Amino acid sequence: TIADLKGVKRGRLRIAAVTTTKYFMPRILGPFCAQYPGIDVALEVVNRDRLLERLGRNQDDVYIMGVPPEELDMECEPFMENPLVVLAPISHPLARRKRIPFADLANEPFLVRERGSGTRMTIEREFQERQAQLRIRMELGSNEAIKQAVAGGLGLALLSQSTLHPDPHREAVTVLDVQGFPIRRSWYVVRPRHKQMSVVARTFLDFLREHVRLLEPRH
Ligand code: PGA
């Protein structure tokens, strides 16, 4: 139809995304904005708790997160893989080992995100499920700071693979070969089921479904 022609769609699109998506969301917006120059996009980048607050206040059109809320009145659509990996400094003794049992990680100091972060919630759940002790060495407010602290030898971390360069060694970190890892998860688009989607929000969802496979992280 004529409304689908390049540049015809107009309006404002408000996306709220958790901090861990900042490694790929802005890149997805490049081709999206090139295809739809009439759509004015605002991207809010906050941690999971702040995002849920925004969702509760109905502040945005689309919400992107890794650990969707459990409420039934939310539509949660997975759109991209989101593997969880164990990071260590390159020179760490575990870096040379294969098939490391998870229990061996219990002796290691860990660098974790602030409370309210989806990444923090995930690491606590993983240790709890395996009944292993999580030794927190330091709490840091961003994935980037955690990655740099791992490189600096402060400890290990569980992070989304999305935060890593395709060759992590270039950032002086390595992905450990831990049994059961990488944990396979997804990135989700979340929206209230009852909320009528705007034309621009629908356009963005269709774009994600169609184009995002190209940006899947490498394994
Ligand atoms: P975070 O969320 O950026 O708050 O850690 C990540 C996630 O939801 O997986």
Image: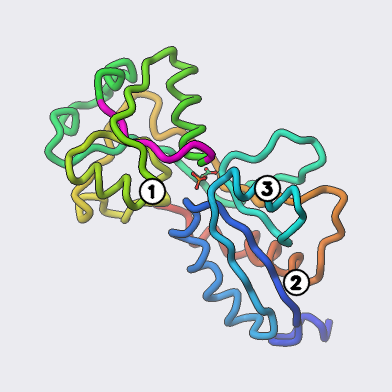
- Which residue is painted at 81% across and 83% down in the image? 3
Q: How many marks?
A: 3
What x and y, as percent, mark residue 45? 54, 59
Residue 16 appears in which quarter of the rendering? bottom right
Q: Is residue 161 left or right of residue 38?
A: left
Q: Amino acid at mark 2?
A: Val
Q: Is 80 or 191 nearer to us in this picture?
A: 191
The residue tagged 3 is 53
- Point out the frontmost of discs 3 and 1: 3
Tell me whether the residue at label 2 lies in contact with that at label 3, contact meaning CB atoms closer than 8 angstroms. no
* Residue bearing the label numbered 2: 200
Mark 3 vs 1, N-terminal side: 3
Query: On the rendered structure, is 173 left or right of 138?
Result: left
Region of the chain picked out in magenta, as a range = 109-116
Which residue position holds label 1?
A: 143
Specify few, some or many for label 1: CA neighbours under 10 Å numbering under 14, 14-19, or 20 or more. Answer: many
Task: Note whether ligand 1 is within 8 Å of mark 1.
Answer: yes
Q: 159 or 167, which is in the foreground?
A: 159
Residue 187 placement (x, y as % from top left): 57, 47
Q: Residues within 10 Å of mark 3 (few under 14, many from 20)?
A: few
Residue at horizontal 70 percent and vertical 70 percent from the top: 13
Q: Residue at x 55, y 75 (%)?
A: 31
From the viewer's perspective, is residue 93 above or below residue 196? Answer: above
Give the distance between the C-alpha atoms of the residues marked 3 and 1, in whole angstroms.
21 Å
Quarter occupied by the N terminus: bottom right
Give yes or no for contact between labels 2 and 1 (Cβ–Cβ under 8 Å).
no
Residue 167: horizontal and vertical position, in percent?
26, 53
